[in-house]
Amino acid sequence: MTIRRFRSSMKMCSAMIAIAFFLTLGQGAVSSVLAADPPAPPPAPPAAGSSEWETWPKKPEGAGAAGESGGAKANSGYSAGTWGWIAGGTAAVILIGVAASGGSSGNGGSPPACSQ
Amino acid sequence: MRSRGILAAVPFCLIAWNVLPASAQTDHPAFPPILAAAESLFQSMKAQDYRATWRVLTAKSRETIVSETDDAIRKAGNPAVPKDRIRDDFAAGGPLCRQYWEGFLRRFNPDDPLEKGRWEMGSVGKDRAEVLITHQGADRPAVLRMFREEGRWKAGLVETFWEH
């Protein structure tokens, strides 16, 4: 019997709190609307394709992505230099030349690794 | 023995060809048009004159850019655009062209070679040449490969930076 009474009083209490909460909210909203100046109109959405409306950097798609990829290649190639690859090619030619000259002076041109 | 000597000389000739030309050839008559074409590549990018950028690129560079743009459009799930239309758009400075070069310039600053790079002539042939551009503080230069096509010097953007 006491439990049932306790439950009903709890329900009443929570209902009162909820009503008070919503009344407070509503009054605040009404008073702020009455007190404040007329709100500024929201900014007009930009034209399609414009980047002004972005709230975070958008990942480019399509042609923009291809351009970014190309720009990254140019940037890394320019910053690091492409000379090294030419030097690498030259080094490879030197190695081939040395190997060829060494091979030609051997016994019949057979590779040294196989002459067991 | 003689063949051994010749083979040994080949690498030294190659090194000399790569290292010496900038200092050895100073007054070649082809230098001004080659340098002008190379410079106009970066100047047109900076000025966002993408039609001029397109004109100074080699045929191979243009075709690669068209193919990569086509692939990127497909990957993004957008409706496919015929390659001819992409090509025309780039030549006319259309929306795809602008998107591409804006993306490109987000990653590459043309002021770097124009204002902070040291420019030297590399080897010069009848239809091929090299312009060495050394980034400030870099150990080695970027070798911009130039090609003579249709009687004009064109910049091999793809040939230089994509294929190394």
Image: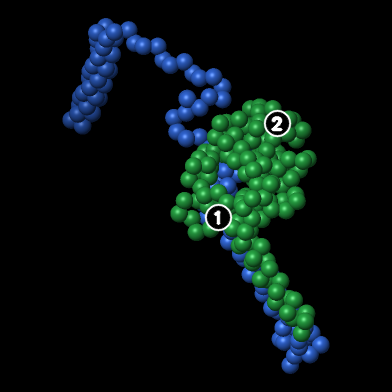
State the residue in front, A72 or B118.
B118
- Type of amino acid at the residue the image marks with label 1: Pro
The residue lying at 50 percent from left, 19 percent from top is A46
Q: Position of residue A82 (x, y in %)?
A: 59, 56
Colour chosen for chain B:
green
- Type of amino acid at the residue the image marks with label 2: Ala
Q: Is residue B71 above or below residue A88?
A: above
State the residue in front, B25 or B40.
B25
| Residue A64 visible within the image | no
Label 1: which residue? Answer: B141
Q: Residue furthest bottom?
A: A116
Chain colored blue: A
Q: Position of residue A94 (x, y in %)?
A: 67, 73
| Residue B120 visible within the image | yes
Q: Chain of mark 2?
A: B
The residue lying at 53 percent from left, 58 percent from top is B140
Label 2: which residue? Answer: B91
Say which element carries label 1: loop
Mark 2 or mark 1: which comes first in sequence?
Answer: 2
Quadrant (top left/top right/bottom left/bottom right) for the N terminus of chain A? top left
Q: Position of residue B9 (x, y in %)?
A: 70, 74
Quadrant (top left/top right/bottom left/bottom right) for the C terminus of chain A? bottom right
B5 left or right of A15 in image? right
